[in-house]
Image (spheres, rainbow, N blue to C red):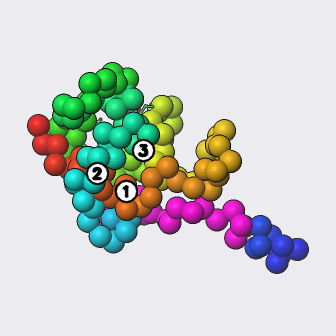
Amino acid sequence: MRALLAAVLAFLAPAAAAQQVVGDAIPASLTGQPGDAGRGRAIVANRSVGLCLLCHSGPIAEERFQGDLAPTLAGAGSRWSEGQLRLRIVDGARLNADTIMPPYYRATGLQQVARNFEGKTILSAAQVEDVVAYLATLKD
Ligand code: HEC
């Protein structure tokens, strides 16, 4: 019985590596490396990868249609530390259970997930770090 349980739990283990939350932040890089701000900007601007501009606006002039359901990303790098930005991207529901912002790096507890996304995160750990690196540059 115990072996069966262990097997089931192993099967359910999330794809996302455990992250250490401290207060309202995840201080450490998910990959152990700093992200790339240029790649992060591309992820944020991309309508099919990040989808950020569905809800947010930001200083991305070439994207004409931007969202107004969420605070602008402009200035995010002066409002928040990298660790605070990381937790907001990984799983904003940890801070506001009712948020409409998707958890970009949580593989468990999602509802109505398409089959090919089951057990997967929306962004990879490296992509989260790229987005965090980009947001940290948005100082005004
Ligand atoms: C479906 C809408 C939606 C999408 C898509 C979305 N967000 Fe959000 N986001 C929100 C909302 C709403 C908030 C406000 C916080 C809350 O809900 O409690 C927020 C908060 C934030 C914050 C904190 C903002 C602040 O200054 O207070 C950051 C940073 C952020 N989002 C970045 C992103 C990035 C980067 C992406 C894409 C990878 C993204 N969001 C995708 C809705 C969204």
Label whose residue precedes the other's in the sequence (1 or 2): 2
Residue 1 placement, left or right of 54: right
Residue 13 placement, left or right of 106: right
Label 3 CA crowd tier, 10 Å (few <14, some 14–19, many 20+): few
Determine if residue 91 is in view. Answer: no
Question: Residue 68: x percent and y percent?
Answer: 33, 21
In this rendering, the answer to whether 115 lies above or below 11 is above
Q: Which amino acid does the dot numbered 2 rest on?
A: Gly
Q: Secondary structure at mark 1?
A: helix
Q: Which residue is mark 1?
A: 127
The reply to whether the C-beta atoms of the residues labelled 1 and 2 are less than 8 Å apart is: yes
Q: Which amino acid does the dot numbered 3 rest on?
A: Val
**Which region of the structure is painted magenta?**
9-28
The numbered mark at residue 86 is none
Quarter assignment of residue 47: top left
Label whose residue precedes the other's in the sequence (1 or 3): 3
In this rendering, the answer to whether 7 lies above or below 79 is below
Q: Is residue 25 magenta?
A: yes
The reply to whether the C-beta atoms of the residues labelled 1 and 3 are less than 8 Å apart is: yes
Q: Which residue is mark 3?
A: 49
Q: Secondary structure at mark 3?
A: loop
Quarter assignment of residue 29: bottom left
Residue at x 32% of width, y 42% of height: 44
Residue 40 placement, left or right of 8: left
Residue 87 placement, left or right of 97: left
CA gap, disc 1 and disc 2:
7 Å
